[in-house]
Image (tube, grey):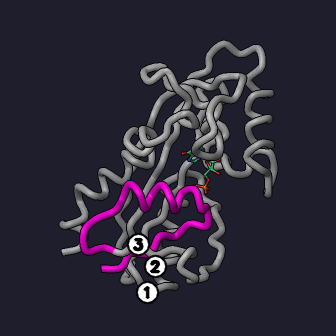
Amino acid sequence: MKIFLATGNKNKIEEIKKIFSMENTEILSIKDGIDIPEVVEDGNTFEENSKKKALEIAKFTNMITIADDSGICVEALNGAPGVYSARYAGEHATDEENNKKLIANLQGIENRKAKFVCVITLAKPTGETYSFTGEVHGEIIDEPRGEYGFGYDPYFYIEEYGQTTAEMKDLKNQISHRARALAELKKNIDEILK
Ligand code: IMP
């Protein structure tokens, strides 16, 4: 069976492919030369955006499609950047610019609690959608650590492992918000596809 992965983020494609590999399933993405239209992420929640992306692209490709909407929520910033994580410092902001803004906004603030959230939606071209959420808790540190991952990973420290998610080589794909949401989808996939 073929499942299309609706994301333009190459880091996410790599992570999801590693986590979601299943027998008899081929995961296709823009990396296989299939162009997809840009979906406007105008929802107020990760779930709304994730569903919208999955559904629009499932209809466009006529394939069962998985989409991810994810981001970081910082307690002391009332959950910001949240759904705006990718464009926290502006519409086409780089990871570096987003991180810089986050660290600046946390100067002098003691509460560094944060969580990564991911909502994975599987959509069928016929319009049904199935969404699953995963979270991982940690704290924001001022100095970057680690060279793996992407986005906010170098600043997201998890005490239990003594590492940022950018210092984790294989561990991130076992414990991340994305891994947890995908594990829930995997648990339910037979039922969804029957
Ligand atoms: P999306 O493509 O709209 O879902 O944007 C998600 C944004 O949240 C990314 O651009 C990153 O900035 C951030 N993000 C999501 N997942 C992760 C992760 O696993 N590590 C670091 N940053 C992440």
Badge 3 element: strand
- Amino acid carrying label 3: it is Ile
Which stretch is magenta?
Answer: 1-25
Residue that badge 1 annotates: 62
Asked if the beta carbon under badge 2 is closer than 8 A to the nearest atom of ligand 1, the reply is no
- Decide which of 103, 155 is in the foreground and name it: 155
Left/right of residue 42 with respect to residue 165 in the rendered view: right
Between label 3 and label 2, give the one nearer the viewer: 3
Asked if the beta carbon under badge 3 is closer than 8 A to the nearest atom of ligand 1, the reply is no
Rendering quarter of residue 41: bottom right
Residue 39 is labelled as none
Residue 58 is labelled as 2
Q: Position of residue 79 (x, y in %)?
A: 60, 34
Q: Position of residue 10 (x, y in %)?
A: 59, 62
- Amino acid carrying label 2: it is Ala
Could one spot residue 78 in this view of the protein?
no
Residue that badge 3 annotates: 27
Contact? badges 3 and 2 (CB < 8 Å): no
